[in-house]
Image: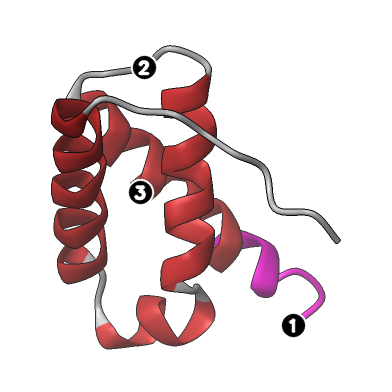
Amino acid sequence: MVAEVRDFSPETVRNMQVALDLAWRSLSPEQQAQSSKSSLATRILDAAEAGERSPARLLMLALMSASDAVDGSSIGT
């Protein structure tokens, strides 16, 4: 499998890192157990690739992704 090359400015990379760190720290231990930091990072990368640059929006999208993962894991229980 060939890794995709994504080219982001240093400022965008910083914004993505801030969003990822804040998103992960804002999750409870239970939410962290049902999600993964890499899934949050993927959501942030996808949003940035689509043109999103706001750290607040990147954070919100990552948290929505984590919420979807947690909600989805409780289906059928």
Of the residues tagged 2 and 1, which is closer to the observer? 2
Instruction: Determine the secondary structure under disc 1.
Output: loop
Three-letter amino acid code at the position of disc 1: Thr
Quadrant of the rendering where the N terminus is positioned: bottom right
Q: Dot 1 corresponds to which residue? A: 77
Q: Dot 3 corresponds to which residue? A: 63
Three-letter amino acid code at the position of disc 2: Glu
Q: Residue at x 75, y 69 (%)?
A: 75
Identify the image's colour scheme: rainbow, by chain, secondary structure or one colour: secondary structure
Instruction: Determine the secondary structure under disc 2.
Output: loop
Is 62 displayed left or right of 56 in the figure? right
- How far apart are the two marked residues, 2 and 3, measured between alpha carbons? 15 Å
| Residue 30, above or below 65 | below
Give yes or no for contact between labels 3 and 1 (Cβ–Cβ under 8 Å).
no
Q: Residue at x 39, y 76 (%)?
A: 31
| Residue 34, above or below 1 | below
Q: How many marks?
A: 3
- How far apart are the two marked residues, 3 and 1, measured between alpha carbons? 23 Å
Q: Dot 2 corresponds to which residue? A: 52
Q: Earlier in the sequence, mark 2 or mark 3?
A: 2
What x and y, as percent, mark residue 55? 17, 30
Find the magenta span and give its range: 71-77
- In the image, farthest residue toward the top: 51
- How far apart are the two marked residues, 2 and 1, measured between alpha carbons? 35 Å
Give yes or no for contact between labels 2 and 1 (Cβ–Cβ under 8 Å).
no
Residue 76 belongs to the span the image colors magenta: yes
